[in-house]
Structures are given as structure tokens and as C-alpha cells.
Image (cartoon, grey):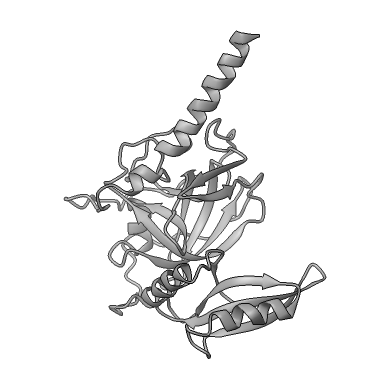
């Protein structure tokens, strides 16, 4: 009985170690600044990840985990998952380190990190600014920077065209082995991309949702609390979801990622930590 209990303790400790030592580990996130390789690699021949049936990672799918004092709950399934927001990327800082799934991170492979998708999950990522598409295998946890929804490997981010700017406005769509996917843009595709120095999000505006209430009065209270941001930027939008009336408190429209970052920082200072980027 004691031996069985000891084995369970060891396995639990190993699982925790995998989560904390991966991309999302708080200690690693406080280390040196991330970067691209000193000598840019030729990634023109690197193919998209190919969706296939795989067992879930033994260590990468706890019911929940905590990073920087915030708890995240892992999804049971990726079926039907679709999300829009800001993508970032990670490179030399994590290259060769262990990911949350227990695999070694290789910045030259088509992989990604996500906070809640099951590991592994295959996703199609579309750069909304230039319409490029890639398919990556999610095998890690992150990103844990406010306002980011997915961390792409250096190679994946290069193919999507976001390495130089650091971030990009994307749509993430989970795939299954029988999901039909559209053709992927060539890494050397020269279609027009944004050249704004302040990193435009493209034609479609983004919003920061800071709350959703069934009672409109509560939504109005939060709106008044955020009046210091701008009387015109904070709005309450009524929506009906699954037959329920909801009043969303939105900050926007925002057309530049740098502005969104500054607003997120201000929200944190105001004690509004429950926020996420959305489009409407």
C-alpha cells in the first residue's frame, strides 16, 4: 500500500515538473529575452504538420494548472474549437528545452503552444493581415503574456509572416484527421503585408472584452469603472447566446496591437484581470 502511494506521488511530481519546466514555466519566462537564430535558416522546404490520430500526452493534459498565479483549465476536446486574437512566437530561448507534453522544443518544426487545447492538437492558423495559412501541431503550453492566444515556433511564425513584427492578428481553427483544409500559402509568398511601424491589426478591428453579465446594471457599473480609458471606447453590447441574454463590456475598436497592449496594461493596473481579445 505504501509503495503504491509512493508511485502515485512520484508520477504526480513528474507531471508537475513537465508543466513547470515547459514553455509556460514561470522561471523560464523570467529569463533572457527570446530571439530568432543568429543565422536565419532556410525554412522554404519545411512542410505543414500533417494531422493524424495521436494519444493525448500523459503529462501535458492535467485538468488544470497554474502559471503566474492564474489557473488554466485544459479542454477535454478540441472539436469545433475556433479562436481569434493575437499570435506571438518563441525561438532560441526555449530551443532544446522540454515542452509541456514532454517533447523537446524544436524551433525549426511546425509546432505551437496554447493555454487550454489538449496536447497534441493540430490547428490551422490564418494570418488575417496577409491571408497566409499554416498547419501546426500544438504540443506545449503558453503564451502567458496578456492578450496572446497562441505561441508559434520560429519556423511557423516565419511562414506566417509575423517574426519581424513579433505578433500578428490570427484565427486558430482546430483540425481533425478528416477535416478539409485549404491550401497553404508558400513561405515565399510575396502578397502585400502591413508595413505600419505600429503593427496594424489589419482591416478588422479587435476589442478587449472585460466582462459579460446577465444583468445590464452590472455591465454599466464596470463601464463606469473604466471611464478613465475613454468614454467613447468602452461600450456595452447586448447578445443572446444559447437563449441567454448577455451584456458584454467591450473596449474598442482597436486597430493597432501596440495600443491593445497598452490598454491591457492599464486594465491590469485597474484590477481588471478577466479580459480577452475578441472580434465582433
- The quarter of the picture where the N terminus appears is top right
Measuring from the top left, give residue 173's x and y in whole percent.
57, 58
Measuring from the top left, give residue 174's x and y in whole percent.
58, 53
Relative height, residue 172 to residue 69 (above, below) = below
Q: Nearer the viewer, residue 188 or 22?
A: 22
Q: Residue furthest left?
A: 39
Residue lying at 30% horizontally and 53% vertically, measured from the top left: 44
Residue lying at 31% horizontally and 80% vertically, measured from the top left: 196
Q: Nearer the viewer, residue 238 or 169?
A: 238
Measuring from the top left, give residue 29's x and y in whole percent.
35, 48
Residue lying at 38% horizontally and 61% vertically, measured from the top left: 160
Relative height, residue 64 to residue 272 (above, below) = above
Question: Seen in the image, is 113 located left or right of residue 39?
Answer: right
Q: How many numbered discs?
A: 0
Measuring from the top left, give residue 115's x and y in whole percent.
52, 50
Q: Residue furthest bottom?
A: 232
Give residue 166's quadrant in the image.
Answer: bottom left
Q: Nearer the viewer, residue 240 or 137?
A: 240
Question: Seen in the image, is 54 located left or right of residue 110?
Answer: right
Relative height, residue 215 to residue 228 (above, below) = above
Residue lying at 32% horizontally and 58% vertically, measured from the top left: 158
Asked if one can make out residue 99 in the rendered structure from this viewpoint, the answer is no
- The quarter of the picture where the C terminus appears is bottom right
Asked if one can make out residue 77 in the rendered structure from this viewpoint, the answer is yes
Question: Seen in the image, is 38 located left or right of residue 271?
Answer: left
Question: Seen in the image, is 98 located left or right of residue 150?
Answer: left
Amino acid at each position: 500500500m505504501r509503495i503504491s502511494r509512493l508511485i502515485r506521488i512520484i508520477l504526480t511530481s513528474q507531471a508537475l515538473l513537465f508543466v513547470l519546466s515547459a514553455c509556460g514555466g514561470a522561471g523560464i519566462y523570467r529569463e533572457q529575452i527570446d530571439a530568432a537564430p543568429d543565422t536565419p535558416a532556410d525554412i522554404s522546404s519545411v512542410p505543414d504538420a500533417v494531422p493524424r490520430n495521436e494519444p493525448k500526452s500523459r503529462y501535458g493534459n492535467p485538468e488544470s494548472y497554474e502559471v503566474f498565479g492564474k489557473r488554466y483549465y485544459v479542454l477535454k476536446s478540441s472539436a469545433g474549437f475556433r479562436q481569434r486574437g493575437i499570435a506571438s512566437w518563441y525561438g532560441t530561448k526555449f530551443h532544446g528545452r522540454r515542452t509541456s507534453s514532454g517533447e523537446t522544443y524544436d524551433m525549426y518544426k511546425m509546432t505551437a503552444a496554447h493555454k487550454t487545447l489538449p496536447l497534441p492538437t493540430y490547428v490551422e492558423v490564418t494570418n488575417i493581415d496577409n491571408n497566409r495559412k499554416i498547419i501546426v501541431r500544438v504540443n506545449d503550453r503558453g503564451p502567458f503574456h496578456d492578450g496572446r492566444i497562441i505561441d508559434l515556433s520560429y519556423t511557423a511564425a516565419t511562414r506566417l509572416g509575423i517574426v519581424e513584427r513579433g505578433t500578428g492578428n490570427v484565427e486558430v481553427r482546430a483540425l481533425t484527421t478528416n477535416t478539409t483544409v485549404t491550401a497553404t500559402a508558400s513561405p515565399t509568398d510575396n502578397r502585400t503585408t502591413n508595413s505600419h511601424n505600429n503593427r496594424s491589426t489589419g482591416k478588422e478591428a479587435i476589442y478587449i472584452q472585460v466582462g459579460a453579465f446577465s444583468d445590464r446594471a452590472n455591465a454599466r457599473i464596470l463601464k463606469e469603472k473604466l471611464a478613465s480609458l475613454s468614454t467613447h471606447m468602452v461600450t456595452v453590447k447586448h447578445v443572446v447566446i444559447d437563449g441567454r441574454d448577455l451584456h458584454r463590456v467591450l473596449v474598442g475598436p482597436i486597430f493597432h496591437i501596440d495600443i491593445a497592449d497598452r490598454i491591457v496594461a492599464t486594465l491590469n493596473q485597474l484590477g481588471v484581470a478577466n479580459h480577452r481579445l475578441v472580434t465582433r
